[in-house]
Image (cartoon, rainbow, N blue to C red):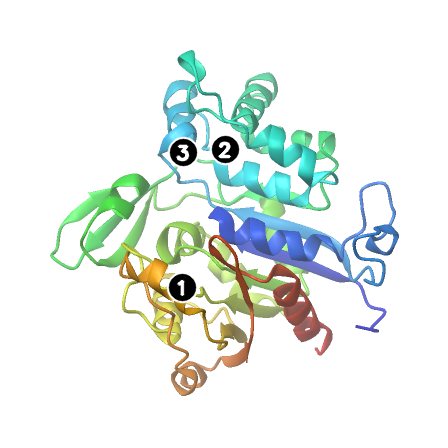
Amino acid sequence: MSDSRQLRVVAIGGGTGLSTLLRGLKRYTASPAGTTPAGDPACPDLPCLIRDLSAIVTVTDDGGSSGRLREDLNMLPPGDVRNCMVALSEDEHLLSRLFQHRFKHGDLNGHSFGNLFLAALTEISGDFAQAVQTSSQILATRGRIYPSTTENATISARMDDGSLVEGETNITASKQTIRELMLTPHDAAPLPETLDAIAAADLITLGPGSLYTSLITNLLVRGIPEAIAASQATRVYICNLMTQANESLGLSAAQHIEKILDHAGEQIFDYALINTAPIGGATLEQYAREGQTPITADLERIRKLGIEPITGNFLHEGDVLRHNYDRVAETVLNLALKR
C-alpha cells in the first residue's frame, strides 16, 4: 500500500464481527496523540491510511448483562459498544482484561466492568451517546463509536410459520426461520453524526456479524440505508465464514446479500468479500455439531445482484473460527484506494 491518500472509513455492524474488523483497521489509523501506526513496534511498516474511523454499532441486545442494565437503568445496551471500545483502544491488552472482566458474586454477578463503566457515564452525562464519546476520549480510542440509534429500540421477527417473535434473545433462541425483521419504533432515527460520517466516507463496510441481529438491525434505522445508497464511497459487504444457527442456516453468500438488500430497500454494496479458502476438518466437525456449515460462494448469483465478489483466504482458525482481521482490513482498504 504505497498510496498517500488518507481515507474516511465507516464500519457498520455489531457483536464480535465488528470488533474483530476494527482491530485490523485500527492499525492503519493515527493514534489520538497524533502518532501513526508506523511508530507501533507491532506493525512498523504500516502506512497511516485512515484519517477518520467511525464504527456504527447495533443497540438492540436485551440479554445478559446488557439486558439487565437496559431494564434496570432504562439505558441502551452497552455490550457491543464496549467490545468496540476495547478493540479501538490504545492499550487493548490491559483494557480487554479490565473491561471484559465479569463479576462472579453478589448483585453484580454476570455484569462486566465495561458495561458498568458505560452505565455510570450515562448516568453522569444523562446521554448514552455522550457517554460513549467521553469514554472513547478517556480510553484514547483510535476512532469514534456511534450507536445506530439512541432510541430505546427493540426488534421483532416474522418467522416462516407466520409467528411473531419479539426481542433479540427470543429471536436467536427460536427454532423457526426468520423471514422479516422489524424495528420498534419503526421510525427510530440515527444520530446526525452517523449520517455525516456516512456522507463523508471513502469506504463503508457492513459485517461480518449475525445476519439479522448484528447487520440488518442497523439498516432498519431510518435514514441509514438511504445514506449508504447515496454515498460515493466504496461499499463492501464482508460475508460471514459459516452459516449461523437461528439466523442463516442453509443460506449461501448471495442469499445473505439478498436478505440484506430486501430489508435495506436500496443497493448498498459495490463489493462482497467472500472467503474461498478451505476450513480445517476439526473446525468443520466442531461447527457441524450446531448444524453450521461453510457459506457457499455462489459468485455468479452475487454478480447478478450488481455486486463484484472479492475472493481469497480470509480465515483465522483458533479455538473459534474468525476472520483474519489484518488480511480483511488490507483488502478493503485497497479496494477503496482503487477508486
Labels 1, 3: front one? 1
What residue do we see at 34% from left, 63% from top?
A: 285
Residue under numbered circle 2: 78
Q: Would you say 331 lies left or right of 64 here?
A: right
Look at the picture and state if 179 lies above or below 171: below
Amino acid at circle 3: Asn
Q: Would you say 67 lies left or right of 38 here?
A: left
Which corner quadrant holds the N terminus? bottom right
Residue 28 location (% of width, % of height): 76, 58
Amino acid at circle 1: Ala
Residue 113 location (% of width, % of height): 55, 24
Look at the picture and state if 298 lies above or below 284: below
Residue under numbered circle 3: 152
Q: Which mark is residue 295?
A: none
For marks 1 and 3 on the same chain, the one whose residue lies earlier in the sequence: 3
Residue 252 location (% of width, % of height): 34, 73
